[in-house]
Amino acid sequence: MNILLIGSGGREHALAWKLAQSPSLTKLYAAPGNPGIAEEAECVTLDVSNHGAVVEFCQGKKIGLVVIGPEAPLVDGLADSLSAASIPAFGPSAKAAQLEGSKGFTKDLCARANIPTGGYVRTHSLAEATAALAKFTAPYVLKADGLAAGKGVVIAPDKDEAKAALADMFDGAFGEAGAQVVIEEFLEGEEASFFAITDGVSVLPFGTAQDHKQVGEGDVGPNTGGMGAYSPAPVLTGELQTRVIKEIIQPTVDTMRAEGMPYSGVLYAGLMLTATGPQLIEYNCRFGDPECQVLMTRFEGDLAAVMLACAKGELAGVEAGFDAKTALTVVMCAIGYPGTPEKGGAIDLGASEEDGAKVFHAGTKLVDGALVANGGRVLNVTASGANVTEAKAAAYEAVAKVDFPSGFYRSDIGWKEVAREGRA
Ligand code: AMP
Ligand code: GLY
């Protein structure tokens, strides 16, 4: 089978790397891809927002499966256009992708399906939102309703800051995404991510992870797309995972199906492990980045076959195996990230992969044959070990071998779990 992979980040490099190992793969194409992906796939130029052009490409190249990496083309209905042309696509329809595309949609769904999540109010104007603050206590959690590249959430410590943030949001700080704002209850606990692949009926658990969203060591400073991650997440014990499936994932899948918008693809649940149990913070309609890099490092099996079964609604009975070892990835960023990253910095990967580590390309490009930085998050240096402590040591050994003078990284990825392992 020929496969087309859409996307250009570290998540897609990890998917390309794993798809290239699939026995059911004949040829892999990637649009647009990146220099790392180019080692696994033929990179092609396609305007992904032009669905007709994507369909035409697939027909011309006899593509049997399209894997859509990022959320934007999903929310934009690319999977619908492919399905209409009878081309199997891994990823949800536009209606189902509202689980990520609208925070208010997901909150309403949780309310209808009795899924544990924080209390909330959807607001449509600054006056309405400011008045709604009275229903909550500090800190105030304010979310632009639509897609905002992971940056649409503000946690304001007091009412004055909340009012200022709301004014910015309704003033267009997050563009159209902020035309509606969800205000929600602040949940306390530790965050963890749970992944499931579903064809709208069957649910295949697909691993757990924890990431580090904040730019600074010790989890301080502005939010980013993720500075590092590890899988599995021991805080999500088997017992908690069973609860997550029963109380959160299955009711979501069942309700979406019952309401005529079956969800197909990977469902990524961002969870808060509160004193009373797991609560849903948010859904994403795609793999996490960089969580995908650690999941793919551990996944054992034919990824293309699992994704095709999902796309065709034939997931029942399909199993997923994962290496028992922990995988940990460190994100190397360009100085300036998450603000304005410095582009064009030279990168020499040296011998970083020689001891079994893998360097996924997130934001790189080749200029006259030389690898340079081309984005905020540039490289995902990934390694495995018997536990988080060992995986961390292996990953940082590889990081030390990368020469990237205009880059930086957090040196404490996995710190919470390393502390727990130290006490055990
Ligand atoms: P989101 O984009 O919805 O995942 O939010 C970004 C980050 O904000 C999350 O990873 C949490 O750290 C934090 N956050 C979001 N919602 C809440 C909430 N209701 N309570 C506490 N923290 C939250
Ligand atoms: N790492 C967080 C995300 O992919 O949304």
Image (cartoon, rainbow, N blue to C red):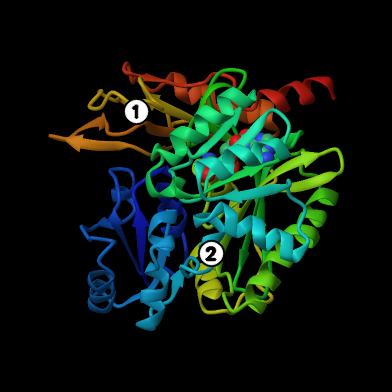
What residue does disc 2 label?
A: 302
183 or 382: nearer the viewer = 183
Describe the element under mark 2 as helix, strand or loop. loop
Q: Is residue 35 above or below residue 303?
A: above
Task: Tell me the quarter of the picture where residue 394 sits.
Answer: top right
Measuring 59% from the left and 37% from the top, which residue is drawn there?
Answer: 130
Q: Which mark is residue 349?
A: 1
Q: Is residue 151 above or below residue 84?
A: above
Q: Is residue 324 above or below residue 76?
A: above
Neighbour tally class for label 2: few under 14, some 14-19, many 20 plus, Cα within 10 Å: some
Q: Which mark is residue 219?
A: none
> Which three-letter amino acid code belongs to the residue tagged 1?
Leu
The reply to whether residue 404 is visible in this rendering is yes
Q: Is residue 266 left or right of residue 389?
A: left
Tell me where residue 319 appears, x and y as whole percent: 67, 67
Gap between marks 1 and 2, in whole Å?
Answer: 29 Å
82 or 167: nearer the viewer = 167
> Which three-letter amino acid code belongs to the residue tagged 2?
Asp
Q: Is residue 326 left or right of residue 261?
A: right
Describe the element under mark 1 as helix, strand or loop. loop
99 or 79: nearer the viewer = 99
Measuring 58% from the left and 42% from the top, which residue is drawn there?
Answer: 129
The reply to whether residue 356 is visible in this rendering is no
Tell me where residue 299 appears, x and y as whole percent: 59, 53
Whether residues under marks 1 and 2 lie with C-beta atoms below 8 angstroms apart, the answer is no
Measuring 27% from the left and 69% from the top, which residue is drawn there?
Answer: 54
